[in-house]
Image (cartoon, coloured by chain):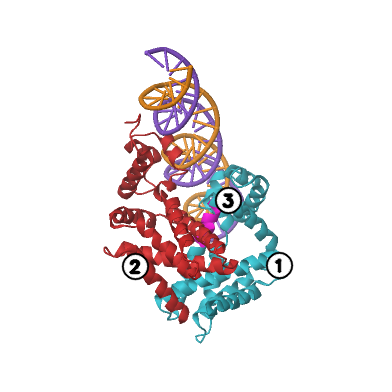
Chain colours: A cyan, B red, C orange, D purple
Amino acid sequence: MGRWEPDAAGRLQQAALELFGQRGYEQTTVAEIAERAGLTERTFFRHFADKREVLFRGSEELQRLIVGGVDDAPASATPIEAIANGLRAADAIFDAERRPHSLKRRSVIEANPELQERELIKLATLAAVLADALRRRGVEDSAARLTADAGIAVFRFAFERWQRDADQRFEDAVQDGVERLRALARA
Amino acid sequence: MGRWEPDAAGRLQQAALELFGQRGYEQTTVAEIAERAGLTERTFFRHFADKREVLFRGSEELQRLIVGGVDDAPASATPIEAIANGLRAADAIFDAERRPHSLKRRSVIEANPELQERELIKLATLAAVLADALRRRGVEDSAARLTADAGIAVFRFAFERWQRDADQRFEDAVQDGVERLRALARA
DNA sequence: AGCCTGATGACAGTCAATGACATCAGCGTC
DNA sequence: GACGCTGATGTCATTGACTGTCATCAGGCT
């Protein structure tokens, strides 16, 4: 056993989510979060760049997973199919166990514009790396950007469905989202 | 003549833009901006909700203008045509005179993630009110949202073109953007 | 045993943001 | 023309996010 309790970042995230849920984001100070996690305020800022980031822990991993899924798509896949393949890979993260945590997180973010800003820039970053992944597959630049943006729309659709329906698999929600997008494009 | 120099908000915005351009956004304090404008820090926060907002002055007016243009579109216009009509109305704001200011502003925002976050949420808000405007025209909900998002893509395209080419009229850039979108949807 | 490393604590400092109260030119009112 | 009201501003105090710097110290390496 180590010198300190393990998983400091995880404890901070858990403490933050609980306090944000109880008192609200703005009414919770970083010092309070740190105290609940058995750490100091200074240590909080060693694990997270700012107060908001504690709610976006793991977003880099999600991004890696999705981009990896795009890269792994067969060469024969069309751009939107490659994106769908990437999004389906996120199924490994969005499992049933994670749902309660995800729902709490969502309600905190929805109650706070500052946090929505952060969420938007995370999605914009994801769009940018998805476009890069498509370009690596030989997709022309503007088509890559547009398809990546459409992929984000599908992601949001699927994520919302997965959160709403208890027994909706994320993978299937992605599939439905892509089909729905195709229908809209046809109309 | 009034008791104070006129247009306090405008002076603050001008001072902020100059200082951000010289020293950078983070290296400039609100007190410095206020001092250059001949005001106090406290007064800055009476005109702007936070330090970032000083760079987004007039975004409500832009929004009103665009939504007004959508509302004014003939009933026979398709959703995307109505959106285009709205975006063209922004031509009244994006004139040649405004370009230098707009370019400085852009370079400041591009250098700072915090400011990009704010820009993203402004665009998301615009998308939301555009979708509302379409629903008022009787467009079904999900189509309204999708078309509004597409409209934002056209806005970004047109804005970028208008900033790059000195003698590109914003109105024309919008038209090109819509045509380009149509071509992509056809492919 | 001695040294190094990396995660943490302690402490001081800056600056964004807010609340409370004071000021005072210009305005209309009587 | 004094009188009081209004609204934009100034002054002061405070909180809390974030940063820089140095100290601490268990565990691993030699």
Classify residue A120 as left or right of residue A28.
Answer: left
Q: Which residues are magenta?
A: A114-122
Report if residue A120 lies within the magenta region: yes
User: Given the current orientation, which residue lies at the most extreme left position?
Assistant: B167
Which one is in front in this view, the residue at disc 1 or the one at disc 2? 2
* Nearer to me, C20 or C29: C29
Q: Which residue is mark 3?
A: A112
Q: In the rendering, at what x and y percent does residue A24 appear?
A: 63, 46
User: Which corner quadrant of the image does residue B37 belong to?
Assistant: top left
Identify the residue at horizontal 70%, vertical 71% (top origin).
A168
Identify the residue at horizontal 39%, vertical 59% (top origin).
B90
Give SS at disc 3. loop
Q: Chain of mark 3?
A: A
Q: In the rendering, at what x and y percent does residue D7 appear?
A: 45, 32
Q: In the rendering, at what x and y percent does residue D2 appear?
A: 42, 12
Give SS at disc 2. helix
Q: Which residue is mark 2?
A: B172
Is D9 placed above or below A58 here?
above
Is A153 placed above or below A4 here?
below
Q: Which residue is mark 1?
A: A165
* Nearer to me, A15 or B108: B108
Q: Dividing the image into 4 quarters, which one contains the C terminus of chain B?
A: bottom left
Q: Chain of mark 2?
A: B
Classify residue B162 as left or right of residue A126.
Answer: left
Q: In the rendering, at what x and y percent does residue B114 appear?
A: 45, 53
Rounded to the nearest angstrom, the CA distance separating label 1 from label 2 is 45 Å
Identified by mark 3, the residue type is Asn
* Nearer to me, B122 or B40: B122
Residue A97 visible (yes or no): yes
